[in-house]
Image: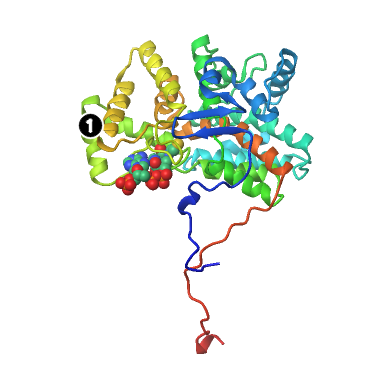
Amino acid sequence: MSSASEQVISGLEGVLACESSVAFIDGTIPELSYRGYNIHDIAETLTYEQVVYLLWNGELPSADQLRSFNADLAARRGLPSVVIDLLRLMPSSAHPMAGLRTAVSLLGTLDPQADDNNPTDLRRKAADLTAKMPTIVAAQARLQMGQAAIEPDASLSLAANYYYMLTGKQPDATITRTIDTSLLLYAEHETNASTFTCRAVVGTESDFYSAVVAGIGAIKGPLHGGAIDEVMKMFLEIDQPERAAAYIDQALAARRKVAGFGHRVYRAGDARAPHLRTMAQRLAESAGERKWFTIATTVEQRMREAKGIIANVDYYAAPVLYYLGFPLALFTNFVASARISGWSAHIFEQYANNRLIRPRALYTGHRGRQLPAGYR
Ligand SMILES: CC(C)(COP(=O)(O)OP(=O)(O)OC[C@H]1O[C@@H](n2cnc3c(N)ncnc32)[C@H](O)[C@@H]1OP(=O)(O)O)[C@@H](O)C(=O)NCCC(=O)NCCS
């Protein structure tokens, strides 16, 4: 290693780290598909549960398969009381993603088969966390508001139950569809930083929970899933649409990255963003409060004029969650509670065809040094 001819690929950009048949992205079009189905068809037609089944099995479920899959997920939503106790004990200063990470880790300690990595146990763990992570996030939201956590309702879909556990109210069809679509748009995105992290953990033959805990740690960062919180904080700081352009000009003059813009793979637009934009607009209209949507479109236009940079998935997802009444501090937790399904699909793949992931570094430090006299 470290000969002059060898070069580091900064940020591993463009490096093919593994084979995968879960999702395909062509950032130049832009195109995104899950198991060969275009995201635009998926976003308009499927439920989140159908998408999870597709990601894990490679095929869409039959009516019978979906019925039993839905029933299995619904039966797994409840949390052991010790998890609620843990969330209650968590200092209010702790980052909500640290709370989610710790709760998932605790669930791992409660699973006697935590270290069994056979396909059946992996499926069970994936179903368990896909069902339970929304319950954890909703409980975090309730506790943060000084209210008791709400028990899941197994008669509701995952999306409808998510809203019910947050608010205590049954959502109408529009709200349910908005949450469903947001979940499925966040479900999977090829070898992004958190998915790669999960695969790297599995590469050592460590366990499912360790991989997911590491994935949560990776998606928390503001360059990844954590960007969604930063987007909404920016809109709140701008506060008035007429201040948006000047705010962006100042940010760019100070060479600050603007949250919700840019993407390592998509250069011509994020395939998921138009769906979130449409949903944000609909919610703004039905709420009779267009301010956040107008700020968003004004900022987007200014970024296009000034830098030609695209709005990514997090950009319009932020106002969508805000209009839905989702607590801002938990936006990234929502993202993680959806991405668990995609992480799981990649974890299955990695275990099924594993090789230790162990890259090298181009060494740039000293060599051949002698210990100074006093240290010998
Ligand atoms: C996502 C992200 C990390 C991708 O980074 P990357 O692939 O390393 O892209 P680069 O940092 O090489 O950016 C290329 C150029 O676009 C600029 N750029 C990229 N994202 C930008 C942003 N959000 N705001 C302003 N400029 C941005 C860079 O400054 C750079 O410009 P330069 O060539 O004049 O220096 C980056 O776009 C970013 O930080 N975005 C904000 C965080 C975010 O929304 N993350 C969620 C992604 S889904």
Q: Is residue 248 visible?
A: yes
Whether residue 90 is visible to the viewer of this picture, yes or no, is no
The amino acid beneath tag 1 is Ala
Q: How is the image coloured?
A: rainbow
In the displayed structure, does residue 120 sit left or right of residue 1?
right
Label 1 secondary element: helix
Q: Residues within 10 Å of mark 1 (few under 14, many from 20)?
A: some
If the picture is divided into quarters, which one holds ligand 1? top left
- Residue at 78% across / 34% down in the picture? 120
**Residue 213, image quadrant:** top right
Residue visible at 70% across and 38% down?
A: 348
Depth check, front residue: 32 or 81: 32
Q: Quadrant of the C terminus?
A: bottom right
Q: Position of residue 139 (x, y in %)?
A: 57, 29
Q: How many marks?
A: 1
The residue that label 1 is drawn on is 245
Question: In the displayed structure, would residue 63 be above or below residue 267?
Answer: above
Compared to 147, does 177 lie above or below? above
Viewport quadrant of the N terminus: bottom right
Q: Residue 157 at x, y = what percent?
A: 62, 16
Rendering coords of residue 216 (x, y %): 56, 41
